[in-house]
Image: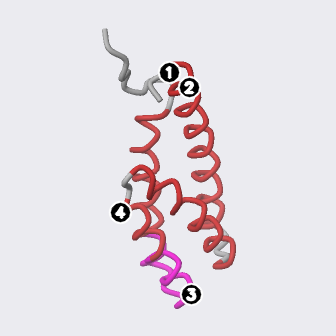
Amino acid sequence: DHDQGKVSEYWSQLDRECQSWEAELRTLLATPDVERLRRLHHRLKNAAGQLGLWKLDRTLGALREAMERGEHDKARDLGASALRLIAVVRQFTGANRLNTSSR
C-alpha cells in the first residue's frame, strides 16, 4: 500500500516496538532470564524477518545460547551487538527516519 498515512503509522508503530525491545533487552542483559529472552527473540524474529534483518535474529539466537551456557562475557558482547542493531532499525523508524515519499 502506498498510502503515506498508513506507511507513516507503520513506521511509528515499529519505532514504539523497537523502544520496547531495547528496554527489555537492556533489562535481560542486567538480569539474565533465558525464557524471557526466548520470548523476546520470538517477537523480534517475526519483525526482523519482515524487514530482512537476519543478523539481528542470529545475534539474538547466539545471545540466548550464551546465556544458557552461562557464558557471561560472550552474552554481554552479543547483547551490545543486538542493541546496536536495534539502534540501526530505529534510524529508519523514528522521528528522524528517512523520508521515502516522492518529492
- Name the magenta segment's main secondary structure: helix
Question: Disc 4 on helix, strand or loop?
Answer: helix
Judge by depth and name the residue closer to the eye, 60 or 48. 48
Q: Are marks 1 and 3 in contact (CB under 8 Å)?
A: no
Mark closer to the chain start, 1 or 3: 1
Numbered badge on residue 6: 2
Q: Position of residue 29 (x, y in %)?
A: 58, 67
Task: Look at label 1 and name its amino acid.
Answer: Asp
Looking at the image, residue 72 lies above or below residue 14? below
How much space separates mark 2 and mark 1, taking CA atoms?
A: 5 Å
Mark closer to the chain start, 3 or 4: 4
Q: Is residue 69 magenta?
A: yes
Residue 28: quadrant of the picture? bottom right
User: Closer to the camera: disc 3 or disc 2?
Assistant: 2
Q: Are marks 2 and 1 in contact (CB under 8 Å)?
A: yes
Question: Disc 2 on helix, strand or loop?
Answer: helix
How much space separates mark 4 and mark 1, taking CA atoms?
A: 29 Å
Q: Position of residue 82 (x, y in %)?
A: 44, 60
Question: Disc 3 on helix, strand or loop?
Answer: helix
**Highlighted range, magenta:** 62-77
Mark closer to the chain start, 3 or 2: 2
Q: Are marks 4 and 1 in contact (CB under 8 Å)?
A: no
Mark closer to the chain start, 2 or 4: 2
Q: Residues within 10 Å of mark 4 (few under 14, many from 20)?
A: some
Taking 45 as reference, is 58 left or right? left
